[in-house]
């Protein structure tokens, strides 16, 4: 709720703030990055940083991950649980921007249990 002062402005006057984590060398760096994010289940804040994790109540795992024509198609299974209307843009940003950080990816499509993320966040899922 800092009106974009700490990063790219999203949703309810929040900032999307990147967090750097060490990942073991792998060719599947996006999958590894997603797994690091999913390991934060149950943690409302990222360590002592004060950065809010909108996915902390969710129980998600990667079902499949493909990159086709510069688009990352990420399919999760599990439950997406959000804490209110402001968590929708936060979750969308967390799940999409993790892929968009890579120069080889221009678009990210996210599905949870086969339903497009946009449908779930708009209440149509």
Image (spheres, helix red, strand yellow):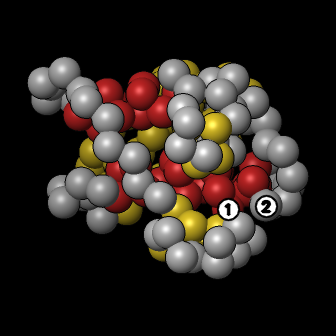
On screen, residue 92 above or below 15: above
Residue 93: percent from left, percent from top: 55, 58
Q: On the rendered image, what quadrant is the N terminus found in?
A: bottom right
Q: Which residue carries the number 1 mark?
A: 89
On screen, residue 105 above or below 66: below
Cα–Cα span, label 2 and label 1? 6 Å
Q: Assign a secondary structure to mark 1.
A: helix
Residue 88: percent from left, percent from top: 73, 56
Report crowding for label 1: few under 14, some 14 to 19, many 20 or more residues within 10 A (C-alpha).
some
Viewer-side residue, 53 vs 91: 53
Q: Which residue is the extreme one toward the front?
A: 48
Viewer-side residue, 117 vs 88: 88
Q: Assign a secondary structure to mark 2.
A: loop
Residue at image x 85%, y 59%?
Answer: 85
Mark linked to residue 86: 2
Residue at image x 34%, y 58%?
Answer: 100
On screen, residue 81 above or below 8: above
Asked which quadrant contains residue 12, the reply is bottom right
Asked which quadrant contains residue 56, the reply is top right
Q: Is residue 69 visible?
A: no
Report crowding for label 2: few under 14, some 14 to 19, many 20 or more residues within 10 A (C-alpha).
some
Residue at image x 15%, y 25%?
Answer: 26
Check whether the beta carbons of the residues at disc 2 and disc 1 lie within 8 A of each other: yes
Residue 15: percent from left, percent from top: 57, 67
Residue at image x 79%, y 36%?
Answer: 81
Q: Is residue 43 left or right of residue 86?
A: left
């Amino acid at each position: 709720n800092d009106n974009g002062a700490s990063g790219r402005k999203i949703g309810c006057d929040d900032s999307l703030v990147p967090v750097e984590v060490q990942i073991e060398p792998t060719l599947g760096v996006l999958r590894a990055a997603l797994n690091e994010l999913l390991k934060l289940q149950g943690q409302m804040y990222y360590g002592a940083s004060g950065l809010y994790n909108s996915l902390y109540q969710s129980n998600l795992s990667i079902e499949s991950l493909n990159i086709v024509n510069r688009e990352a198609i990420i399919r999760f299974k599990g439950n997406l649980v959000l804490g209110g209307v402001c968590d929708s843009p936060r979750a969308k940003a967390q799940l999409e921007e993790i892929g968009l950080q890579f120069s080889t990816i221009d678009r990210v499509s996210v599905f949870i249990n086969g339903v497009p993320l946009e449908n779930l966040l708009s209440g149509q899922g």
